[in-house]
Image: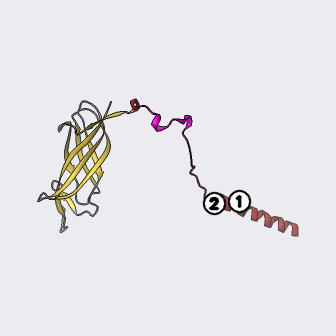
Amino acid sequence: MKMSRVLRFFFYMLCAFMLGSAAYAQRTTRNKLRPAGGIAAADLKVDSVLFDTIVSPEPHTLDVNGYDKPLRSRRETFFATNNAKAEIAALSFTITYYDTSHRMLHKASHHVPVNIPVSETRQVSIKSWDTQFAFYHVRSPQPRGTVEASPYEVTISVDTLFVVR
């Protein structure tokens, strides 16, 4: 009888130990991994680049229209029309924000991956610069009620186009 109690005690202790070790957090990341075949990024040929860049494109290579950012929006959107002779894979642009007296409020540069086929238009969306919801674009709907908010204007200049070969 005593032997079965001792065996039962050791069995429960063994089960508790196994459950405890299984629940213990394990480190799943591995250090010093190398790619199979030993091909480093520096060994890749320049021909493997999938797109070309156009720095300071001509003014009408990409048309930007329809900018919008309502007062409580976390996103800014606009439409980009591809007038180039190749498909656009990404674009880099700078947005400058002005108050109604044309004093600069903010300036931000963005790089956005967006596929725009030739002669087509796509909507581009970026995170808003107005994190406190205190501004709205002059052409967006006016805020309702007694909310105090400031209107602003923007200029968007395209810095670089990334076109598909």
Q: Which mark is residue 24?
A: 2
Q: Position of residue 101 (x, y in %)?
A: 11, 59
Q: Position of residue 145 (x, y in %)?
A: 18, 67
Left or right placement of residue 33 versus residue 8 in this view: left
Q: Is residue 106 magenta?
A: no
Density class for disc 2 (Cα within 10 Å; few <14, some 14-19, many ≥20) is few
Task: Indicate whether 153 appears above or below 33.
Answer: below
Task: Indicate whether 65 appears above or below 84.
Answer: below
Density class for disc 1 (Cα within 10 Å; few <14, some 14-19, many ≥20) is few
Among the two numbered marks 2 and 1 on one chain, the one whose residue lies closer to the N terminus: 1
Q: Amino acid at mark 2?
A: Tyr
**Which stretch did the figure color magenta?**
22-45
User: What distance separates the C-alpha of mark 2 from that of mark 1?
Assistant: 10 Å
Residue highlighted by disc 1: 18
Q: Position of residue 63 (x, y in %)?
A: 19, 40
For the point 25% across and 49% down, the residue is 77
On the question of residue 139 being in view, the answer is yes
Task: Indicate whether 6 appears above or below 110.
Answer: below
Image quadrant where residue 134 sits: bottom left
For the point 56% across and 44% down, the residue is 33
- In-front residue for pair 85/43: 43
Image quadrant where residue 6 sits: bottom right
Left or right placement of residue 115 versus residue 5 in this view: left
Looking at the image, the residue that sits furthest to the left is 101
- In-front residue for pair 35/29: 35
Q: Which mark is residue 147?
A: none
Q: Which secondary structure, mark 2?
A: loop
Which quadrant holds the C terminus?
top left
